Amino acid sequence: MRGMKDVKKSAPILLAGIAIVAAFSTPSAAPPGGNWPQFRGPSRNGVSAETGLLQSWPAAGPAKLWSVPGLGTGFSSVSIANGRILTMGDRRDGQYVIALDEETGKQLWATRVGGRHDDADFPGSRGTPTQDGALAYSVTTDGELVAIETATGTVRWRRHLERDFGGMMMSGWRWAESPLVDGDRVLVTPGSPRAIIVALNKLTGADIWRATTPRLGSAGSDGAGYSSIVISNGAGVKQYVQMTGRGLVSVRASDGQFLWGYNRVANDVANISMPVESGNFVFGSTSYGTGSVMLELSPAANGGVTAREKYFLDGGTFQNHHGGFVLVGEYLYGGHGQSNGFPKCIEFATGKMMWDQQRGPGQGSAAIVAADGRLYFRYQDGTMALIDPSPTGFKEISRFTIPGPRTYSWAHPVIAAGRLYLREQNNLNVYNIKR
C-alpha cells in the first residue's frame, strides 16, 4: 500500500465547493428561483434539466453577475433552494455553514459547526450542504452530521460518525460526504463494518437502521471513501449505492439489508467519485491506476439483488480521480487520469471508447456537469470549458479562466436558474448563462 507521504502531491479529496460572506457588483440579470438542492444537482447525477442556456461564450466568458469574497477555505460546492445558497468553508475560528441570498449573494446567516481543518495540503471543508425544506444537512471535515434550520441557521441536532457509529475513513483526508435526504430520512456513510451506511430520522437524528456488510475483498482499505450515496431502483429493488474504501456497496432502502458489493474497483488511497446509475446498471470509477466498472443488476431470492460485472476498463483506459462523470443519452462523459481531466466519451452499454482526447482544455483534474446540450468542464487550474457532448468526436466550444485561480480549484460547478456558480476557494463567482 502506498503511504500518505507518497501520494499527497497528486492526491485527492473529493469534492466540490462554495461559500460565504458578501460583496457584489452588478444586479441580477437572471431571476432567482434555482433548484440545485444538493451536491451534483436534483438527481445527484451532475445533469441539469435547464434549457435556454448559452451554447457558446464570448472570449472573456459569460457576463458576471456578482462575486462574493471571504468564503473561507475549502472545496465545498453550493446547494440552492427556496432563494438560499448554502455552502461550507473554514474561517479563522472554525468551520461554518453559510447561507447567502440567491439574488444578491448577501449573507443571511453563518453557523459554526466545527473546528478548522488545517491540513497542510488540503485544508478546509469538503462536503456540500443538502437542503430539504426547513432543514439542511452537512457533514463536517471532522465527521459530524449537523441538521440546521435553513431560515435561521439554528442547529437542530447532531450525530458524530466516528463516536456514535464507530465510523472511520479509508485514509487520512477526513470526511468528504454530502448527505442524501430520501423521504423521512437522511443517509450518511460512517464506514464501519457494523454501520457502513446509516439511515436517520431527518427531524430528530434518531436511528432508523444501520447497515452491516461482510468483507468485500482485499482491494482498497476499510472505511468510508470520499464519495456520496446515490439511489438505484435496479432489478426492481430500491437501494442505496455508495463507493466505499472497499469498493461499491449496495443496501436495501427499506431496512438496510446488504444486497451486493464489488471490490475490484477499489484502490487503497482514495475512492472518490460518485457512481452513476441508470435502470439496471451502475457505473463506478476510481483513480490511482485502478479503472472503472459497469455492473448489471438482476433480482435474487428473498428480495435480493445480484450484481454482475458487464465490463471493466483498466486504469489506462478510463480512471476518474474526483471530478465525476455524467450520463447524457447513451454516452458517459468525464475526465480521465490521476490529477488529470482528459475528456473521454464512452458508450455506456458496452464500454466502447467513442473518443479519447489526449489533452484537456485545462490542467489537472476536471469537475463536470451537463446542461442543455453542453458539457461544463471545470479544471484544477481555473479553466472553465464548454464542450459539445457529441459521440462522433471531441469538440471544444468555448473557454475562459475563473478570476484568481488558486491551487486545487476543485469545487464542482452548479447550474441553476440560468446561472453558472463557480467557487474559487475564498470566492463565489456567479455568471449569467441564459440566452
Image: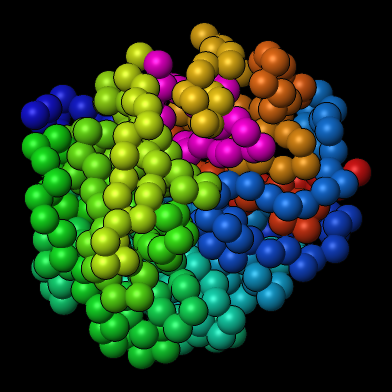
Instruction: Specify the segment rendered in magenta.
Output: 317-345
The single residue placed furthest to the top in the displayed view is 358
Task: Determine if the magenta segment contains residue 291.
Answer: no
Give x and y (percent) for residue 395: 71, 16
Task: Determine if the magenta segment contains residue 333.
Answer: yes
Residue 175, placed above or below residue 271 = below
Residue 392, placed above or below residue 272 = above
Residue 281 in view (yes/no): yes
Q: Is residue 190 left or right of residue 94?
A: left
Residue 129, placed above or below residue 275 = below
Q: Quadrant of residue 14?
A: top left
Q: Is residue 178 left or right of residue 224?
A: right
Q: Which residue is painted at 45% across and 61% down in the image?
A: 236
Q: Nearer the viewer, residue 64 or 294?
A: 294
Where does the N terminus fall, quadrant-wise?
A: top left
Q: Is residue 46 left or right of residue 29?
A: left
Q: Which residue is painted at 54% across and 72% down in the image?
A: 131
Residue 341 in view (yes/no): no
Residue 110, placed above or below residue 345 = below
Q: Quadrant of residue 180?
A: bottom left
The single residue placed furthest to the front in the displayed view is 301
Q: Quadrant of residue 295?
A: top left
Q: Nearer the viewer, residue 280 or 292?
A: 280
User: How did the renderer colour the structure?
Assistant: rainbow
Q: Which residue is painted at 24% across and 48% down in the image?
A: 261
Give x and y (percent) for residue 37: 59, 65
Where does the C terminus fall, quadrant-wise?
A: top right
